[in-house]
């Protein structure tokens, strides 16, 4: 039994012990290597997984579409990627419109003004020209609309005629006999001169004793007078009488009374004037000064006090009462309009 027991015990000389120690060392090294490999593997896997997750998130989560991103997204008509509302696409991603609630396109204020919107801008809203405003009166210094007024010389607000009638202005004058239109200056030679008389009353007008008087403003003297009874005994209610050169009188409607004059029968102003005078009743029926203010003038014992109108400035067109036949004794009764309308109703542009 003893030999069996001895062979099972380790030797004391260390040789067999070294082998055992080496085996343990190898085992430790192997364990260490395994641990390193495991650690490396774990790090590599974790790093690869994190990178892959980040890349996938960027690719699959683009920014939400919005108006102004430069792309025409669902629900958008256009998208030009800018905030300029005066171009073809607004910040609403819609073309400019006169009911979009913003200043867009050629509008001068929100949904008003400009050539495309029917609505005109109210007082204190933006404008570039009179036509942008409901009052037809744009302040050129501040580019805002004036409110309608009873002394602005413009038919606006609730007025029935220029600066009269309606809710806020004084009542309009009764229909009258008036100097209704005058063309005293044309480009080149003055071969289209005329003065138009209009009977705006409901009654025929007796022409006996009525004169068209022409006054030189440089010395306040009468240089000509035309007896209107030479056209006929009466001017019917609503009728016209034209005093002018043959090139004008020859082209008026057949029912218009005419009296021919030579070329250049009207002086060109700075200033000058014409007046409609009733020498029978010793009264001035109507008058107009052009190219500047005029002092009082006496004609056959009748004192003529003139109302100034705006000048023609040597251009095509004529001075016309707007509305037709309206006389409020104000410069604003007159507008310069092209073309002239001898023997016809004056129409506002």
Image (cartoon, helix red, strand yellow):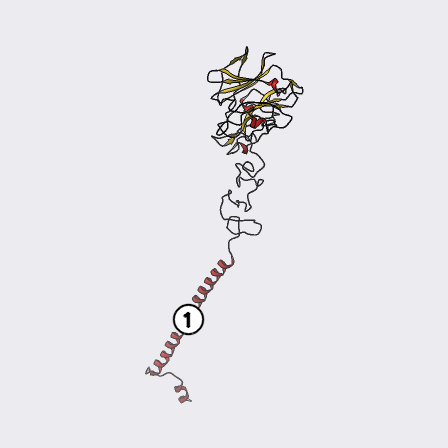
At label 1, counting other C-alpha atoms closer than 10 Å, the crowd grade (few under 14, some 14-19, many 20 or more) is: few
* Residue at disc 1, secondary structure: helix
Residue corresponding to mark 1: 37
Number of callouts in the render? 1
Pick the front one: 247 or 318: 247
Q: Residue at x 39, y 73 (%)?
A: 33
Pick the front one: 310 or 181: 181
Residue 57: x, y in percent?
Answer: 50, 59
Residue extending farthest to the top is 301
Residue 107: x, y in percent?
Answer: 53, 38
Residue 176: x, y in percent?
Answer: 62, 19
Q: Quadrant of residue 194?
A: top right
Compared with 251, 296 (above or below) is: above
Compared with 306, 61 (above or below) is: below
Compared with 66, 202 (above or below) is: above
Pick the front one: 329 or 297: 297
């Amino acid at each position: 039994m003893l030999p069996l027991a001895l062979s099972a015990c380790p030797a004391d000389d260390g040789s067999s012990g070294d082998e055992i120690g080496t085996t343990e060392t190898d085992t430790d090294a192997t364990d260490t290597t395994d641990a390193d490999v495991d650690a490396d593997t774990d790090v590599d896997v974790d790093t690869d997984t994190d990178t892959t997750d980040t890349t996938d998130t960027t690719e699959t989560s683009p920014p939400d579409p919005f108006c102004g991103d430069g792309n025409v997204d669902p629900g958008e008509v256009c998208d030009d990627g800018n905030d300029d509302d005066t171009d073809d696409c607004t910040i609403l991603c819609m073309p400019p419109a006169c009911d979009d609630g913003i200043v867009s396109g050629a509008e001068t204020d929100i949904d008003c003004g400009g050539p495309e919107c029917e609505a005109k801008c109210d007082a204190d809203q933006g404008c570039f020209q009179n036509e942008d405003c409901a009052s037809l009166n744009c302040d050129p210094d501040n580019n805002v609309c004036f409110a309608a007024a009873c002394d602005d010389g413009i038919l606006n607000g609730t007025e029935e005629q220029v600066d009269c009638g309606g809710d806020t202005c004084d009542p309009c004058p009764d229909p009258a006999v008036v100097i209704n239109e005058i063309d005293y200056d044309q480009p080149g030679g003055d071969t289209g001169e005329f003065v138009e008389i209009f009977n705006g009353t409901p009654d025929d007008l007796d022409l006996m004793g009525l004169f068209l008087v022409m006054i030189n403003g440089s010395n306040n003297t009468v240089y000509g007078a035309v007896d209107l009874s030479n056209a006929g005994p009466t001017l019917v209610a609503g009728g016209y009488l034209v005093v002018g050169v043959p090139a004008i009188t020859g082209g008026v409607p057949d029912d218009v009374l005419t009296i021919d004059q030579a070329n250049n029968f009207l002086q060109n102003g700075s200033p000058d004037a014409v007046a409609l005078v009733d020498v029978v009743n010793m009264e001035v029926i109507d008058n107009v000064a052009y190219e500047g203010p005029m002092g009082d003038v006496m004609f056959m014992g009748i004192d003529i006090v003139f109302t100034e109108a705006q000048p023609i400035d040597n251009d095509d067109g004529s001075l016309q009462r707007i509305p037709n036949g309206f006389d409020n004794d104000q410069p604003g009764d007159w507008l310069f309009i092209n073309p002239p309308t001898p023997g016809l109703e004056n129409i506002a542009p």
